[in-house]
Image (cartoon, rainbow, N blue to C red):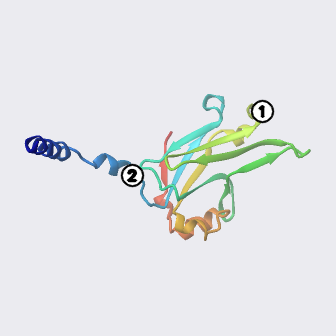
Amino acid sequence: MKKIITLLAIAGLFVLQSCTTSGYFETAPIARNEVFEVTTSFNSNNNYGRLVTFNPPIYSSDVVLVYRLSGSNSQGDVWELLPETYYFNNGALDFGYKFDYTNRDVDIYMIGSDLQSVTAAFRLNQVLRIVIVPANYAKTINKNSYSDVITALDIKDNQIQKINL
């Protein structure tokens, strides 16, 4: 019996010695405050949506914010926080932008009953900024203001990562 236990112990050592954990560390979530910029068009080919994957994943406690470049003025670019909704004069929904996210990706998409009829200015070449906000900042910053969020996270324009899809 002692020989069998000794043999199993030695075999166990060899098995454990060949194991590595590098795969875990490569996909483990990391704390970060980052901004990604994506230019995309919403059309029937992509079902009026765009999926952006986080690699490596973010912590599930982090918050993801998405802003759409809606224009510019004398003070600079104007960024609108999603969700963003547009209505007809009668109050009915025309179209809008929404998103949802997990710790691995963010799905940005349009909503509406007739998205093909939405003008090209709102569908094509839309510039989106995806901001990952660590949990400790999420409750204290003004999320409605892109400028306030970027200032609070101390993100400079040269740190914004452009993603080509």
> Quadrant location of the N terminus?
top left
Which residue in the rendered view is the most extreme toward the right?
Answer: 90
Q: Is residue 30 above or below residue 148?
A: above
**Depth order, front residue of 151/104:** 104
The part of the image, by quadrant, that contains residue 144 is bottom right
Q: Amino acid at mark 1?
A: Asp
- Mark 1 to mark 2: distance in Å? 40 Å
Helix, strand or loop status at disc 2: loop
Q: Tag on residue 16?
A: none
| Number of other residues with Cα within 10 Å of mark 1, as a class: few under 14, some 14 to 19, many 20 or more | few
The percent coordinates of residue 100 (x first, y second) are 61, 47
Residue at point 46% right, 59% down?
159
Residue at point 71% right, 42% down?
122
The percent coordinates of residue 52 (x first, y second) are 52, 43
Q: Are marks 1 and 2 in contact (CB under 8 Å)?
A: no
Residue at point 49% right, 49% down?
162
Closer to the chain start, of discs 1 and 2, is 2
The percent coordinates of residue 87 (x first, y second) are 83, 46
Residue of label 1: 114
The percent coordinates of residue 54 (x first, y second) are 47, 48
- Number of marks present in the image shown: 2
Q: Is residue 27 above or below residue 31?
A: above
**Residue 131 horizontal side relative to residue 26, left or right:** right
Q: Amino acid at mark 2?
A: Ala
The part of the image, by quadrant, that contains residue 6 is top left
Which residue in the rendered view is the most extreme toward the top?
Answer: 45
Residue of label 2: 28
**Depth order, front residue of 59/112:** 59
**Residue 155 horizontal side relative to residue 91, left or right:** left
Which residue in the rendered view is the most extreme toward the left?
Answer: 3
Helix, strand or loop status at disc 1: loop
Residue at point 51% right, 61% down?
157
